[in-house]
Image (cartoon, rainbow, N blue to C red):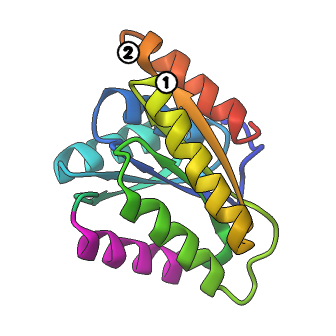
Amino acid sequence: MADQMTGRVVLVTGAGRELGRAIALELAGCGAHVVVADVDGTGAKDTAIQVEDAGGSAEGVELDASTPHQVESVFKVVFRDYAEKFDGLVDIDEQDSTYRAFIEGRLDLEDADGVADLVTVAPTGTAVEKAADAIQTEARERGWPLRVSAIDAAAATTDPASVAALVRTTLGC
């Protein structure tokens, strides 16, 4: 396992299955602790086990990203447990509530410094780029310390590993 992301905590939504699982494994391979989140709690836990079997660090949590109170609850726990180390979100589920919970949690931290990373991954390039642009514009207008990246997964749906490698590179590993 490499260590370019040692000390960082990244939450990956939709990580209980193919694409999200590949991203979680890739980021753990760079040394990040990965919070594996998926609506399928068993899938999330299975991914976390695969990460640990590969020598990484992870935990699996059930998260229905379309349910705002569940998003708030999960993010509250992750921020409580990891504080400023929780500085990365890879959002495959494309839910407004996930990135807002991430941003608000980061802003509430007293010791958070530097820029946090939000990577949105979606199967349609135009939609994901528009969403990322809107998030980045809002972040800039409000003074949020956030770097937003968009990855179009449409061309790589048969090869999750290539999308995972793009995410890894985007996050600096």
Left or right of residue 2: residue 37: left
Q: Residue at x 48, y 68 (%)?
A: 100
Where residue 114 appears, as percent x and y from the top left, is: 82, 67
Q: Residue at 60% across / 33% down in the picture?
A: 167
- Which residue is painted at 39% across and 58% down in the image? 96
Residue found 46% across the figure and 10% down from its top: 155
Left or right of residue 6: residue 49: left
54 or 75, nearer to the observer: 75
Front residue of 50/100: it is 100
Q: Is residue 54 visible?
A: no
Secondary element type, mark 1: helix
- Relative side of 141 to 65, left or right: right
Magenta part of the protein: which range? 67-82
Q: Of label 1 and label 2, which has the lower sequence position? A: 1
Amino acid type, callout 1: Gly
Residue 65 appears left or right of 30: left
Quadrant in the picture for the C terminus? top right
What amino acid is found at the position of numbered circle 2 in the picture? Thr
Q: Quadrant of residue 22?
A: top left
Q: Position of residue 43 (x, y in %)?
A: 22, 43
Residue placed under numbered mark 2 in the picture: 157
Which numbered mark, 1 or 2, is in the foreground of this view? Answer: 1
Q: Could you tell me what secondary structure mostly forms the magenta stretch?
A: helix
